[in-house]
Amino acid sequence: MLIVDRRAFVKTAAMAAATAAAAGSARAFSLPMLEVQPEGSPLRWDKAPCRFCGTGCHVMVGTENGRVVAVQGDQKAEVNKGLLCVKGYHVGLALYGKDRLTTPMLRKDGRLVPISWDEAIETVAKRIMANPSGFSFYGSGQWTIPEGYAANKFVKAGLGTNLIDANPRLCMSSAVTGFLSTFGVDEPPGVYDDIDDCDVAIMWGNNMAEMHPVLFSRLVDRRTRGEKVVIIDLTTRRTRTSDLADHVLFFKPHGDLAIANGIAHQMVKSGQYDREFVANHCNFRKLGPRPDEKTQPDMLGVPMTFEEFAAAIEPYTPEKVEELSGVPADKVRMLGDLFCRRDLRINSFWCMGFNQHTRGTAINCIVHGIHLMSGHFGKPGDAATSLTGQPSACGTAREVGTLCHLLPGGLTIANPEHRRLAEGHWNLAEGRISGKVGYHAVELFKRFNTPTDQGGDITTIWVQVTNPGQTLPNLERNFLRKKGLADKFLIVSDVYPTATTELADLILPSAMWVEKNGMYGNSERRTQQWFKMVQPPGGARDDCWQTIAVSHKMMELGAEGMKDKSGQWLFHTTDRAGKEAPIWQWEHYYDVNVDERLFNEYRAFSRHKHKDLAPYEEYVKARGLRWPVVEQPDGSWRETRWRFSGFDDPYVAKGKDFQFYHSVSKDDRALIWFRPHEFPPEVPDTEYPFWLCTGRVLEHWHTGTMTRRIPQLHRAMPRAYVEMNRDDAARLGIRNSEVVTVKSRRGAIDLPVWIGGRGDPVPGAVFVPFFDETKLINMVTLDEYDPYSKQPDYKKCAVAIVRKG
Amino acid sequence: MSISGLVVTVSDDGAAAAALSMLAADPRITLGERFGRRVAVVVQTPSADSDRLLWEQLRDTPGITHVDVTYVHLDSDVIAGADPNNSQEDGPHAHR
């Protein structure tokens, strides 16, 4: 094809896509489904979810001659209706950084040297077999569902330990404990459809405009159609979300606990809570007494009466909330008044602001509670919406159970009956699955970074699809001490060199995104599927294959745990003729669809907690399906939007409006919790007078290992910075772009100052993004965590800003 | 050469007309159909960098409230037959 023809074709396709997206008319996001590919397109187009955040946008990926050459928003995807953000726009380029890892490398005499895959797999197998109880997997919310499932089975069935955790521990685990405490099951009850129907959107420490931009477009798009949507931004710094908000309310760190309690207080005082909903569907809870100084009360608490709840909430008057949070009393009243109104539909949104919080479980519970009390729950537009940070934090880590206390399908290690169920699914001898919970992420890396003879019982960690060398809090304590510990061994599967591979003893080059088959699960319970479209570069191979190959090698070397009780390999797979497929051999890995085989095994777990998944082939046809997906009498499969609501959830008993059928109190009721305001563990003082908050930026995905290799994104946001309030900078004589030292009790880094930049912190606060591997802000952060979710707080610690020279 | 499809949302005041005039006058921009406050736009620039800069410029233009991306041709170098790897970046941890 002539270049000019090709260019004309591309322009036509671009205009068709833009026109289709612009033409939506009836209501928000009800855009027409147009075929945007002109006849005779030279590209092959296939669907895939975007590789980056938890929104779960679908893209159409155009390939030609074995390369990804074009991406467009998928018009058929309900999530994004053809729109993409700037990261999604460039997602295809993430494959083509020129320093892709393509050969396994083993550290020998201090240097990484290329080795064969055979040697790499055998090295891992022998290392694990030498000390299985000293080995842990550390995975990711970017693991595909089959990858996470394989790793989970490898550890919990194959090794008989629970030494596996994943980076959603740093990202979503407080949302999980919030759901479990409130509903008895880890389950976002609402869906994105609520964005289209709410009258009021409350952003609780959530910069949706930058972190989930397509969802924010979905919200503000309604205004362009003349609909009234009030946006309230509760925040500690002015952001792009603030720019489009009707009310911007700045609060002090941990002030969110006071504000939410203040809303509950007003509902109780005025008597305008939803009495019928509360009477029929809710119980009240509080934490019980502490057994002793070192032990936290049980997460599921003890019952309390409404009167006891009212007395507990009594101190949270608007004036007291103003004192604790900094939000003016009249604005606290405004929030309370909104929740008291039945004629409005209210949608609360949160993400890391709530979850990366030493009282993360508490704030998740309180906000679920004010939605339950007010009856702003379980109807289109009335929802408490927890957004995930990663593309499969919900689908893989939480649902597949790749955390140290979980089994697939919402089953738990602590429950003996759940362990028996898992042993049944995996055909294991009774008692094979250990009842001992493994180590959560921070504890795991602490132990790995502690000398073995001083209690550091974790000697080998295998990291897949994540970068703890940049993301763990207090990096010096939790990651870098490994350097001097000769008996520790770090295995890293990744696509690019990272801060983690810097300390790796063995590097395994991985395939990424559309270089492999995959499945993700997004924030709204939507399971998504895609097929491999291009070959990975050089010797890079699928993470899932790596796990399977090590398992088989261990079996060959005599590890009996890699067999089930019938003596069959845990990952035994047959082809269509019933003959064993040698999927442990890379050249045969794609002879069968391993994803399909693993997913269909996994979906059997999904029934126990009513998280039913459809057969794999249903996801091939769809742009994702939201669980529970239930087979209908005609053989079709129906997804579910609103959980626990009688009008939509197939598991609510006929005739009931609502039914919380996994209720903690075993009576089909949800729990409204009283959790008090508490101050953060570290607060500014004269030596460290500023609050530090860390976070993400629009252009970069988490640690930037992919997006910093995309020139357009890298040049748009090339380096980290410290945002300062203008008045603070003036007081300290600091000029814009001047390099200062950001220093805490744990470490220090130098950063240029950005005043009046993209974000604007309140006086006394600074913000630093964590995407820049040359400026590791986690040298500075605090590793205190929520006692229930074990999720660290990256949003608040005390720092000093020191001028250089 | 870089080509992308955008949806530009304009404000509901007088600034919208000025913004649309500016877009119409820009040789890099092809205006498509307008649907209320949403306008389909195709942007053609010499490089992906300039594409990105123009996108930023649009977002900061008075009268434009929002810019969404709907289509991007990722690798325009392929059109000219060049190796797209040449335009990519190294990170600081290259293990060579």
Image (tube, rainbow, N blue to C red):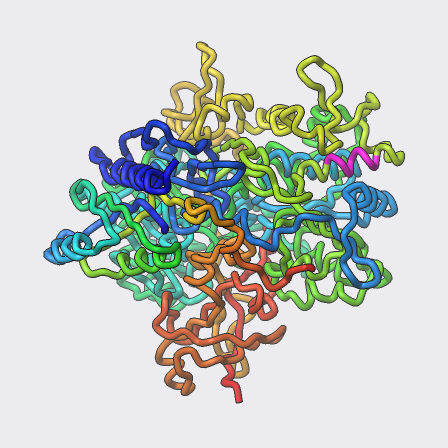
Residue A530 placement (x, y as % from top left): 52, 32
Q: Quadrant of residue A234?
A: bottom left
In the image, A230 versus A532, the foreground residue is A532
B27 is higher (above) or lower (below) than A513: below
Residue A431 lies left or right of residue A302; in this view the side is right
Q: How many marks?
A: 0
Q: Is residue A663 above or below residue A309?
A: above
At x 86%, y 62%, the residue is A453
Of the pair A4 and A31, the residue shown nearer to us: A4
Residue found farthest to the left: B14
**Residue depicted at x 35% and y 62%:** A239
Magenta residues: mostly which secondary structure? helix
Q: State yes or no: residue A549 in magenta.
A: yes
Residue A257's spot in the image, x, y percent?
A: 44, 58
Residue range (magenta): A548-554
Task: Identify which residue is drawn at 36% across, 65% down.
Answer: A758
In front here: A457 or B22?
B22
Residue at the top extreme of this rendering = A634
Would residue A176 be found to the left or right of residue A415 on screen?
left
Please tell me whether residue B21 is drawn above or below residue A567 in the rendered image: below
From the top left corner, tell me how far across and down residue A310 is, in percent. Answer: 41, 51
A523 is within the stretch colored magenta: no
- Residue sticking out furthest to the front: A2
Q: Quadrant of the N terminus of chain A?
A: top left
Residue A228 in sight from this viewpoint: no
Residue A717 visible (yes or no):
yes
- Expressed as whole percent of the image width and height from the top left, the position of residue A173 reads 56, 48
